[in-house]
């Protein structure tokens, strides 16, 4: 599944939620939307899911407008891990099966077994980590073409995080589905990320494939005017710069994000 | 609508009913009041019932949980309104079957009109950022006191969804309110 977000803006009255955001993703990619609180991550996810119509610009999924894309081909685990009051895991299972024609019962029951979920337990009373994992994997068992998840690695243990990475990667490889993850603090391991989008105050700071970004950026100790690079932003005592020259060292994902966010603050 | 679309719609409605009946178990108590003969208490029960459906979810900003499933805003509106109609129909049918109310078809029509109007008024209030009951309670107070002051046969009582002296006119008023509530919910709801 391919996704094109082109010059998308979203206004809520006088307030700007998104301003002129563009990026593309290819089939089977895992894309992380990064930015501080209030940067527009959730608004972007809601716009891509078709929940909010953009005020300007357009979104194309597999070449067609979002409105024509079947809602049951998009699954998401909403922000703040909100769940229906009184719902047990079994209630969710039943509702997902009704709403998603491609729901994979075997996969869901395998997850339940793997993570020892008690299906008769109320989800609203479950610990945050279990709730987060349950909603993420439940959405994944719906076998959507587009999976939207908010902070899936927050609140879960390192072991669960490793397993979740494997599950997400095999899901995208097998179904060629696209996964969009929103993240504030970059809990995701670099090995999982194909592409990233950095937002701040509703504006796009930078987007690229991770391998391309690491090839075109360097961490250097000084940001002098004479050097043949474009300074992006400071990272403590060093600088993130844009260059294809073999200077300094390649940045980590975290350094790329911090460099762009710090540079935008300047 | 082809068979596939019809099946998808029915499955979505079934899922919606399951969510509503699990989340709002207290509705079962209100449902028992639908067995009452036509009275002020029955109207009050219907008003509380209407306010506890979609208006309550809009007010508490819980609608995002439905939207994270493959429901559209219009789908949620139709499912919630449809759920209300179904509950009132069942209440009237049961009270007719149990012979609690021999005049149950008249009661059914009256309740459907009143429910439609007060579901709409409550939704307009909730979508405007108010609570779900202030606007309906005010509307009911104005309607009952004005109707009582103006007396039987006054045109106001023909259009009133409480008095319903002319059910056709009252029904039209209810449908107009429903259309207004839907438009308001769609426009303002996108900000929630």
Image (cartoon, coloured by chain):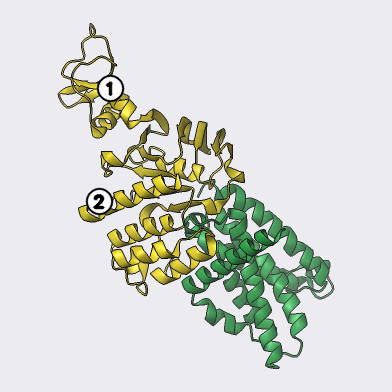
Chain colours: A yellow, B green
Determine the residue positioned at 44% across, 66% down.
A92
Determine the residue positioned at 65% across, 67% down.
B82
Q: Residues within 10 Å of mark 2 (few under 14, many from 20)?
A: few
Ranked by sequence position, the earlier of labels 2 and 1 is: 2
Q: Residue furthest top?
A: A226
Q: Nearer the viewer, residue A177 or A138?
A: A177
Q: Locate residue A189, reporting x and y percent.
A: 26, 42
- Depth-wise, is mark 2 or mark 1 nearer the camera? 2
Task: Name the residue beneath numbered marker 2.
Answer: A162
Quadrant for the C terminus of chain A in the image: top left
Determine the residue positioned at 28% across, 68% down.
A116
Q: Is residue B27 visible?
A: yes
Question: Disc 2 sits on a residue from what chain?
Answer: A
Which label is found at residue A201? Answer: none
Q: Nearer the viewer, residue B91 or B36?
A: B91
Secondary structure of the residue carrying numbered label 1: strand
Question: Disc 1 sits on a residue from what chain?
Answer: A
Q: Nearer the viewer, residue B147 or A248?
A: A248
Task: Name the residue beneath numbered marker 1.
Answer: A217
Are the residues flagged by discs 2 and 1 from a single subunit? yes
Q: Residue furthest front?
A: A174
């Amino acid at each position: 599944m391919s996704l094109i977000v082109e010059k998308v803006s979203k206004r809520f009255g006088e307030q700007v939620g998104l301003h002129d955001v563009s990026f593309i993703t290819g089939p089977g990619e895992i894309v992380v939307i990064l930015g501080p609180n209030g940067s527009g991550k959730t608004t972007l996810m809601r716009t891509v899911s078709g929940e909010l119509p953009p005020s300007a610009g357009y979104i194309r999924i597999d070449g067609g407008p979002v409105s024509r894309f079947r809602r049951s081909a998009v699954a998401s685990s909403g922000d703040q891990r909100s769940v229906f009051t009184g719902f047990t895991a079994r209630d969710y299972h039943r509702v997902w099966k009704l709403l998603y024609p491609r729901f994979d019962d075997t996969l869901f029951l395998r997850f339940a077994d793997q993570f020892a979920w008690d299906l008769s337990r109320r989800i609203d009373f479950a610990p945050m980590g279990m709730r987060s994992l349950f909603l993420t994997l439940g959405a994944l068992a719906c076998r959507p073409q587009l999976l939207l998840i908010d902070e899936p690695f927050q609140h879960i243990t390192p072991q669960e995080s490793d397993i979740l990475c494997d599950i997400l990667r095999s899901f995208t490889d097998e179904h060629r589905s696209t996964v969009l993850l929103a993240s504030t603090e970059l809990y995701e391991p670099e090995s999982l990320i194909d592409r990233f989008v950095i937002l701040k105050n509703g504006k796009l700071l930078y987007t690229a494939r991770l391998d391309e970004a690491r090839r075109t950026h360097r961490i250097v100790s000084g940001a002098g005017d004479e050097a043949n690079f474009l300074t992006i932003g400071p990272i403590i005592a060093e600088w993130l710069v844009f260059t294809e020259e073999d200077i300094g060292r390649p940045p980590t994902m975290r350094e790329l994000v911090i460099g762009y966010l710090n540079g935008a603050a300047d | 609508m082809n068979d596939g679309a019809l099946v998808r719609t029915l499955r979505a409605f079934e899922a919606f009913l399951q969510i509503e009946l699990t989340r709002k178990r207290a509705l079962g108590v209100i449902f028992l009041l639908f067995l009452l003969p036509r009275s002020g208490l029955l109207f009050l029960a219907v008003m509380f019932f209407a306010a506890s459906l979609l208006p309550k979810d809009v007010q508490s900003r819980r609608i995002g949980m439905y939207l994270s499933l493959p429901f559209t805003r219009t789908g949620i509106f139709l499912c919630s309104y449809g759920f209300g109609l179904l509950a009132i129909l069942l209440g009237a049918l049961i009270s007719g079957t149990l012979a609690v109310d021999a005049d149950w078809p008249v009661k059914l029509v009256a309740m459907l009109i009143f429910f439609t109007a007060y579901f709409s008024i409550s939704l307009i209030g909730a979508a405007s950022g108010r609570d779900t009951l202030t606007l309906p309670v005010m509307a009911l107070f104005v309607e009952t006191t004005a109707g009582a002051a103006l007396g039987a046969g006054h045109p106001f009582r023909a259009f009133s969804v409480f008095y319903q002296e002319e059910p056709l006119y009252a029904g039209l008023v209810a449908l107009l309110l429903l259309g207004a509530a839907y438009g308001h919910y769609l426009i303002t709801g996108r900000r929630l």
